[in-house]
């Protein structure tokens, strides 16, 4: 099993790097450049025109890995690997449509918020029902650290699952605001899932997590500051979908609370800022939201934001693994 994980990581990493030398020049040629919001950080305006939709690189690399391992598994009647990838891919397609609209309009507005929400909600509900049908998901909520599960009515679970998925996907999207940040934060998350897959003897989930880990590491070669390419909503929505897919494929969505702590803090900072601004008629708690911009405005370099946030994610990834590792008897 470790051999499969290593092969998945190496293949996804190598293919992503290789694709970087092909995709980035192509995106430049197609003038698929990022538009920077004028009400955002003024120091990011220099990034205007940097190629976006670079998430295609690791999405395509992971597809090769999934097909290589997934065909064999599907023949043997196991569809977990295909299911998690397709779920993430559909979210990536939503992001691609949004990115394409932005590039076409040469602006920062693609799909409307309502359009994105309804599409994401429909995909979330379909995925949860598919996992239930395939037998990978139970209507029980597993509580990490306490090692107990509580059954809840299936309709309630469906609402809960849809809320977790849509919330997590958008939280990952919000985190993608500084060069390399969402990749750096998500690498420990993917690594934690790979370790859990090994401990629990779940090879398909482990192959996907390892491929995600390799793809993100390969993408970071081009996305670290100063970024040569951005993943765009294509990549960040795929990544959010991948994180959710793994959490539900392991039947432990609540692990996303400690494991995705950085995503959660980023989103909460945005919600708190907007809410307080409206209630106080113009006052702010943070210098700028989401949280990474607050620290940037406090004098942190993008490299420091990347290092600190990624380190926090790594610490909580270790905590998360310790919190669930004893779920099953060895």
Image (spheres, rainbow, N blue to C red):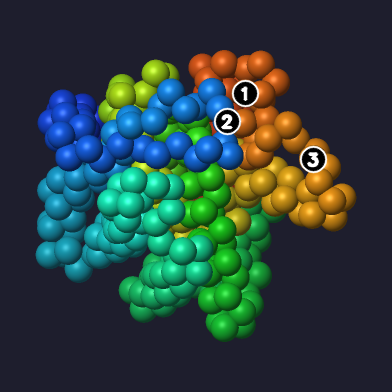
Which residue does the numbered mark 3 point to in the structure image? Answer: 284
Question: Counting other residues with Cα less than 10 Å from the Cα at mark 3, is it few (<14), some (14-19), or many (20 or more)?
Answer: some
Residue at screen point 67% across, 46% down: 270
Mark 3 or 1, closer to the camera: 3
Q: Nearer the viewer, residue 139 or 57?
A: 57
What percent of the width, then of the height, locates residue 241? 41, 55
Quarter holding residue 70: bottom left
Q: Are marks 2 and 1 in contact (CB under 8 Å)?
A: yes
Observer able to see residue 242: no
Which residue does the numbered mark 1 point to in the structure image? Answer: 296
Q: Quadrant of the N terminus?
A: top left
307 vs 286, left or right, is left
Question: What's the mark number on residue 14?
Answer: none
Q: What element carries label 3?
A: loop
- Measured in 3D between alpha carbons, the distance from the residue under mark 3 to the one under mark 2, in whole angstroms, is 16 Å
Up the image or down, 4 lies above or below 150; here it is above
Which badge, 3 or 2, is on the more N-terminal residue? 2
Q: Are marks 3 and 2 in contact (CB under 8 Å)?
A: no
Q: Nearer the viewer, residue 54 or 131?
A: 54
Up the image or down, 60 lies above or below 76; here it is above
Residue at screen point 30% across, 47% down: 103
Quarter holding residue 318: top right
Which badge, 2 or 1, is on the more N-terminal residue? 2
What percent of the width, then of the height, locates residue 306? 52, 23
Q: Do the residues labelled 3 and 1 touch (CB within 8 Å)?
A: no
Which badge, 3 or 1, is on the more N-terminal residue? 3
What percent of the width, then of the height, locates residue 292? 61, 31
Mark 2 or 1, closer to the camera: 2
- Measured in 3D between alpha carbons, the distance from the residue under mark 3 to the one under mark 1, in whole angstroms, is 16 Å
Question: Counting other residues with Cα less than 10 Å from the Cα at mark 1, is it few (<14), some (14-19), or many (20 or more)?
Answer: some
Which residue does the numbered mark 2 point to in the structure image? Answer: 41
């Amino acid at each position: 099993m470790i051999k499969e994980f290593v092969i998945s990581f190496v293949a996804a990493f190598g293919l992503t790097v290789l694709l970087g030398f092909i995709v980035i020049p192509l995106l430049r040629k197609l003038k698929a450049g990022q538009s920077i919001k004028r009400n955002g950080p003024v120091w990011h305006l220099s990034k205007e025109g940097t190629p976006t939709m670079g998430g295609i690189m690791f999405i395509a690399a992971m597809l090769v890995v999934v097909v290589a391992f997934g065909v064999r598994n599907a023949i043997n009647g196991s569809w977990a690997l295909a299911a998690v990838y397709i779920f993430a891919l559909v979210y990536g397609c939503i992001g691609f449509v949004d990115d394409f609209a932005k590039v076409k309009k040469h602006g920062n507005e693609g799909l409307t918020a309502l359009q994105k929400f309804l599409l994401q909600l429909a995909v979330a509900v379909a995925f949860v029902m598919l996992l239930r049908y395939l037998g990978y998901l139970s209507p029980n909520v597993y509580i990490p650290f306490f090692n107990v599960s509580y059954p809840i009515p299936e309709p309630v679970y469906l609402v809960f699952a849809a809320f977790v998925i849509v919330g997590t996907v958008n939280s990952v999207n919000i985190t993608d605001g500084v060069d390399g940040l969402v990749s750096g934060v998500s690498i420990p998350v993917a690594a934690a899932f790979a370790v859990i897959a090994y401990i629990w003897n779940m090879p398909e989930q482990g192959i996907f997590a390892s491929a995600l880990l390799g793809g993100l590491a390969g993408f970071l070669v081009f996305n670290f500051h100063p970024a040569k390419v951005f993943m765009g909503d294509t990549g960040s929505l795929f990544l959010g979908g991948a994180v959710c897919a793994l959490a539900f494929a392991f039947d432990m969505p609540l692990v996303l609370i400690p494991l995705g702590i950085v995503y959660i803090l980023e989103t909460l900072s945005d919600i708190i800022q907007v809410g307080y601004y409206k209630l106080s008629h113009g006052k702010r708690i943070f210098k700028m939201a989401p949280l990474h911009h607050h620290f940037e405005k406090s004098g942190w370099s993008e490299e420091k934001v990347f290092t600190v946030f990624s380190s926090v994610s790594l610490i909580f990834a270790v905590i998360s693994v310790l919190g669930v590792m004893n779920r099953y008897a060895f």
